Image (tube, rainbow, N blue to C red):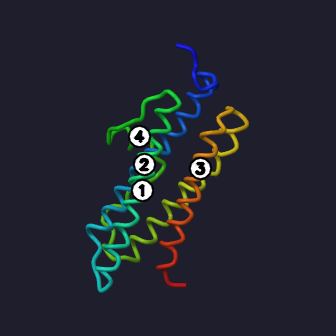
């Protein structure tokens, strides 16, 4: 079948590889944010429980969008925990405290890592691979992560 979006197979493959890494990062961050929602303790439990819920709901939409972008350029999205763990740039902290400050700092670091990864792919997607759609799409994702990171940072002591 003829390439229907006007981007070579090789270029679509290169973009898909980066998008699948991003999808893995999004899934791991979503899971870590769910963990914070479920397990946060302390005097600010109720407000932080609701705050983390708002964040993971936004991440759920982001995840779905990334997977659909992978599909729209003609590739399959990874969809197993094993594949996500093999592709992600993020790490899990084991035996961390369940207080809001610990969760906030860890999640902020993860958003920052994702922002940097996205920023590094915006220009190559457009200029190197000719995929202006994916470049524009991840620019919007970067802005969403910047806002989520700002919300996390606003909770941290100065």
10 Å crowding of disc 2: few (<14), some (14-19), many (20+): many
Which residue does the numbered mark 2 point to in the structure image?
63
Give the CA separation, mark 4 to mark 3. Answer: 18 Å
- Mark 2 element type: helix
Image quarter in which the C terminus is found: bottom right
Q: Position of residue 53 (x, y in %)?
A: 34, 66
Give the CA separation, mark 1 to mark 3. Answer: 15 Å
- Mark 4 element type: helix
10 Å crowding of disc 1: few (<14), some (14-19), many (20+): many
Among the two numbered marks 1 and 3 on one chain, the one whose residue lies closer to the N terminus = 1
Give the CA separation, mark 2 to mark 3. Answer: 14 Å
Give the CA separation, mark 2 to mark 1. Answer: 6 Å
Give the CA separation, mark 4 to mark 1. Answer: 20 Å
Residue 75 left/right relative to 83: right
**Label at residue 59:** 1
Q: Which one is in front, 89 or 20? A: 20
Q: Position of residue 109 (x, y in %)?
A: 50, 64
């Amino acid at each position: 079948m003829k390439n229907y979006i006007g981007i070579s197979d090789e270029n679509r493959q290169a973009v898909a590889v980066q998008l699948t890494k991003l999808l893995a990062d999004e899934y791991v961050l979503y899971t870590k944010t769910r963990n914070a929602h479920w397990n946060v303790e302390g005097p600010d439990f109720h407000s932080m429980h609701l705050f983390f819920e708002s964040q993971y709901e936004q991440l759920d939409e982001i995840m779905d969008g990334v997977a659909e972008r992978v599909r729209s350029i003609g590739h399959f999205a990874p969809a197993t925990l094993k594949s996500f763990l093999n592709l992600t740039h993020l790490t899990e902290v084991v035996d961390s405290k369940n207080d809001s400050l610990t969760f906030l700092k860890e999640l902020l670091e993860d958003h920052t890592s994702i922002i940097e990864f996205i920023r590094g792919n915006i220009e190559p997607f457009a200029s190197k691979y000719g995929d202006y759609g994916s470049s524009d799409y991840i620019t919007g994702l970067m802005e969403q992560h910047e806002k989520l990171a700002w919300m996390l940072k606003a909770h941290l002591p100065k």
